[in-house]
Image: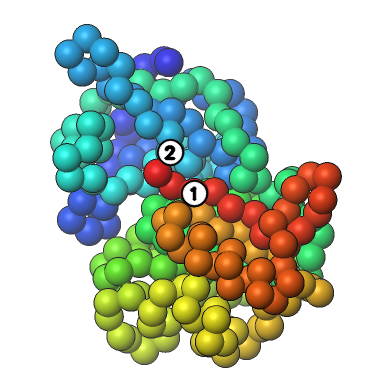
Amino acid sequence: MVPAKILDRTDWAPGLWSFRIQADIDNYLPGRFVNIGLKQDGELVKRSYSLGSAPDAPPELYLVRVEGGALTPRLHDLGAGDEVLVSPRAAGFFTLDEVPDARDLWMLATGTGIAPYLAMLRAGDGLERFERIVVVHGVRHLADLGYRAELEAMAAAGTLTYVPASTRENAEGVLHGRLPDRIADGGLEAHVGVELSPAHSHVMLCGNPGMIDGTVTTLKEREMTKHRRRRPGHISFEKYW
């Protein structure tokens, strides 16, 4: 791993923040992740985090503090000018070049799982293959909707349809409830005005394993299948933790 300097920090909500870093990372495809680490008692503690930045921009990380965690409480104490360690190469297969052609691309995320989609949307490469792009960001509280203004601006420009979702709060324009439940009862499709079906949809899932497992189970009931290189399907996912 190589040293990287923190350029700046944005705090979105208590315990929820992002860093931009100055780091020598090889060119990467949007959607990939890097390892971030710190030395602790002489040993390296590291975790994997998706990059939220386009490849031509300073690497950006979207983080949530995990109480009792070995790394995030220490990262949370850092700011501009501090150093972290980063892997010089990004890795992973949660990228648009792994997604088969479809009319509609759905990007569903919970929490910091929005990061790889930000990288894809900011870069823009490969998005022209899809007629519609629907970005759904599920959180507990509305304050946790990091990057909301940027995504709303993209939606206003006609780039995508943005759906903020909250399990704890009701608000106008916000989808209420767990994403698997709102897919099962048709609430998400009604909110967007677009049908989820194997005929013309591909669904990307990133974030909480519970959301991913529940959504995959619900989509399988619609005869949608996991995507594999040798057996193209309708669902791609990246689980966090």
Question: Tag 2 or tag 1, which sits nearer the N-term?
Answer: 2
Label 1, secondary structure: give it. Answer: strand
Disc 1/disc 2 C-alpha distance (Å): 11 Å
Residue at the extreme top of the image, as rendered: 42
The quarter of the displayed image where residue 208 is located: bottom left
Q: Nearer the viewer, mark 1 or mark 2?
A: 1
Number of numbered discs on residues = 2
**Model colouring:** rainbow
- Work out whether residue 223 or residue 171 is closer to the camera in this orientation and state it: 223
| Cβ atoms under marks 1 and 2 closer than 8 Å | no
Provide the residue designation for mark 2: 49
Numbered badge on residue 86: none
Q: How would you rate the neighbour count of disc 2 (Cα within 10 Å): few for under 14, some for 14-19, many for 20 or more?
A: many
| As drawn, 163 above or below 187 | above
Q: Is residue 156 visible?
A: no
- Give the residue displayed 32% in from the left and 33% down from the top: 7
**Residue 199 % position (x, y):** 81, 74
Numbered badge on residue 239: 1
Which quadrant of the rendered structure holds the N terminus? top left
- Amino acid type, mark 1: Lys
**Residue 196 % position (x, y):** 67, 78
**Residue 116 % position (x, y):** 53, 49
- Give the residue displayed 38% in from the left and 58% down from the top: 111
Q: Horizontal placement of 11 versus 111: left or right?
A: left
